[in-house]
Image (cartoon, rainbow, N blue to C red):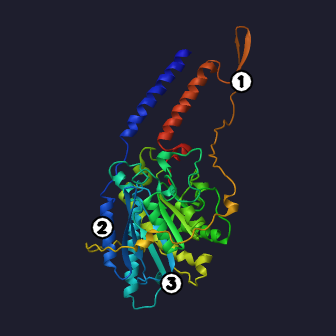
């Protein structure tokens, strides 16, 4: 029987040896007829802003740290007209493109600007009474970062399709001072290196300064890799206590029905994503900066993509899926605005809820725009932190919690009848047919299962291994 085990061993080795070669030819490349390059995208962003000077403006703020420079581009949108006093308005800070490999999210940011431009123009030229939606938009101000991590995006466009970190190897979504530096047993520095210290990176330092000056009610960080609508916490498998957190959860549940077909995971990122993440922007915004509604949206993920096929894993690859994803999630931001008055922190500002929730069909118009580019600069003192950070809740952070990845063992529904085998005067009990001796079969079975497991993991079907490719 030894030849049976040897044959299976050789077949398994051949399968493992051939698998990497097959995957190498299956890596999907970005189609820049469907996606904009970073230069194309920013040119279109400036075009949109230039078309709507009464309620849009764009600022570019550079910051260099140790000869490494980043530029944060921020578009301010006030559909009711640009102003300097935002105290009586709902304030939303929205980031796209925090991870370079997620090309789909900056496309949503561009479409959102086009959509807000359309809605703002309608408000400018209306001669009738404002609709409930227009009344809300009149008292709303957005600050939108179309591509937060430009240097990381450069690496992706140069061919590093799995790169999520910034231009010098730090994950911007691990560089925030909220449980920073804590490393789980499955910590992978290739995916989530947090930097030498909180806010060591110019990308996060610039965004911190903007947060301190803007004091937003809503932080929205748009990502891809799965379908999910997350709120704090990322570093715990729980949501915060209190009515505000429950109201945020209810808003996400409504958006799940309206824009995700009920498919999205909703709730704590630490509970739903498959791993705990430390030093994230969403946890900092809620727990330290005091932003009452702090969200991470995961808007697309191909769970059947190969582990090495990062572009396909994080981005739709056909024109219909690209357009559907972009138009749906740009409209979802407008839907979010209409749901905000249901939150107690917004209700205290005496907003009237909108009776009509924006759908995707009427919000898909992409506006043509002139080519002229206008720029302005934020005040220099914006780069310095302006607001004192709030302390962490001792009840939340007083203990240590660890993530436990749950695995399901396959169970046999029934066991075969025992066979009695007589050999050399001894009687043996064998659960397999007498023709096979389990001493030969067991190694073969283990080897076959190992081959299946490894091949499945390569195809992205083994969730606990696939989660090494971070999404949050």
Looking at the rendered structure, the secondary structure element under dot 2 is helix
* Mark 1 or 2, nearer chain start: 2
Q: Is residue 368 left or right of residue 197?
A: left
Asked whether residue 391 is in view, the answer is yes
The span from disc 3 to disc 1 (Cα, nearest Å) is: 74 Å
Q: Position of residue 275 (x, y in %)?
A: 58, 50
Q: Is residue 282 above or below residue 55?
A: above
- In the image, which is nearer the foreground, mark 2 or mark 3? 2
Q: Are marks 1 and 2 in contact (CB under 8 Å)?
A: no
* Mark 2 or 3, nearer chain start: 2
The span from disc 2 to disc 3 (Cα, nearest Å) is: 33 Å
For the residue pair 51 and 352, the one nearer the viewer reads as 51
Mark 3 closeness class: few <14, some 14–19, many ≥20 residues within 10 Å: some
Looking at the rendered structure, the secondary structure element under dot 1 is loop
Q: Position of residue 194 (x, y in %)?
A: 50, 52
For mark 3, what is the residue?
Answer: 132
For mark 1, what is the residue?
Answer: 418
For the residue pair 358 and 433, the one nearer the viewer reads as 358
Mark 2 closeness class: few <14, some 14–19, many ≥20 residues within 10 Å: some
Asked whether residue 472 is in view, the answer is no
Q: Is residue 254 above or below residue 9?
A: below
Q: Is residue 17 left or right of residue 87?
A: left
The span from disc 1 to disc 2 (Cα, nearest Å) is: 74 Å
* Mark 3 or 1, nearer chain start: 3
Q: Is residue 281 left or right of residue 416?
A: left
Q: Is residue 231 left or right of residue 379?
A: right
Snapshot quadrant of residue 126: bottom left
For mark 2, what is the residue?
Answer: 43
Q: Position of residue 124 (x, y in %)?
A: 38, 86
- Image quarter where the N terminus lies is top right
């Amino acid at each position: 029987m030894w030849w049976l085990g040897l044959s299976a061993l050789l077949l398994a080795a051949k399968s493992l040896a051939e698998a990497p070669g097959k995957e190498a030819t299956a890596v999907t490349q970005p189609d820049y007829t469907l996606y904009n390059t970073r230069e194309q995208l920013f040119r279109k962003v400036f075009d949109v802003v230039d078309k709507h000077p009464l309620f849009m403006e764009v600022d570019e703020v550079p910051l260099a740290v140790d000869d490494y420079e980043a530029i944060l581009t921020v578009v301010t949108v006030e559909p009711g007209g640009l102003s300097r006093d935002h105290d009586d308005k709902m304030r939303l800070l929205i980031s796209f493109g925090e991870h370079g490999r997620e090309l789909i999210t900056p496309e949503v940011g561009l479409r959102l600007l086009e959509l807000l431009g359309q809605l703002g123009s309608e408000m400018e030229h209306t001669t009738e009474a404002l609709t409930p939606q227009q009344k809300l938009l009149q008292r709303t101000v957005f600050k939108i970062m179309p591509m937060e991590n430009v240097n990381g995006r450069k690496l992706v466009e140069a061919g590093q399709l799995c790169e999520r970190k910034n231009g010098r190897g730090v994950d911007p979504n691990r560089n925030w001072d909220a449980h920073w530096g804590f490393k789980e047993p499955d910590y992978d520095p290739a995916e989530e290196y947090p930097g030498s210290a909180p806010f060591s990176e110019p990308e996060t330092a610039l965004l911190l300064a903007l947060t301190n000056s803007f004091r937003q009610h809503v932080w929205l960080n748009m990502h891809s890799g799965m379908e999910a609508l997350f709120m704090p916490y990322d570093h715990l498998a729980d949501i915060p206590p209190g009515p505000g957190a429950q109201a945020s959860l209810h808003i996400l549940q409504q958006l799940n029905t309206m824009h995700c077909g009920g498919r999205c995971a909703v709730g704590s990122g630490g509970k739903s994503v498959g791993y705990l993440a430390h030093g994230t922007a969403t946890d900092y915004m809620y727990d330290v900066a005091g932003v009452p509604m702090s969200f991470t949206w995961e808007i697309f993920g191909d769970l059947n993509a190969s582990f090495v096929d990062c572009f396909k894993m994080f981005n739709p690859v056909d024109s219909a899926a690209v357009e559907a994803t972009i138009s749906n999630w740009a409209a979802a931001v407008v839907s979010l605005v209409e749901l905000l008055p249901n939150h107690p922190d917004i209700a205290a500002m005496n907003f009237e809820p909108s009776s009509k929730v924006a759908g995707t069909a009427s919000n898909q118009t992409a506006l043509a725009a002139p080519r002229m580019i206008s720029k302005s600069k934020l005040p220099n003192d914006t780069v310095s932190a302006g607001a004192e950070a709030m302390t962490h809740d001792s009840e939340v952070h007083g203990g240590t919690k660890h993530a436990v990845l749950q695995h399901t063992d396959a169970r046999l529904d029934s066991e075969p009848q025992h066979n009695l085998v007589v050999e050399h005067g001894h009687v043996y009990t064998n659960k397999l047919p007498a023709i096979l001796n389990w001493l030969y079969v067991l190694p073969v079975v283990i080897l076959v299962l190992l081959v299946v497991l490894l091949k499945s993991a390569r195809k992205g079907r083994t969730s606990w291994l696939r989660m090494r490719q971070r999404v949050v």
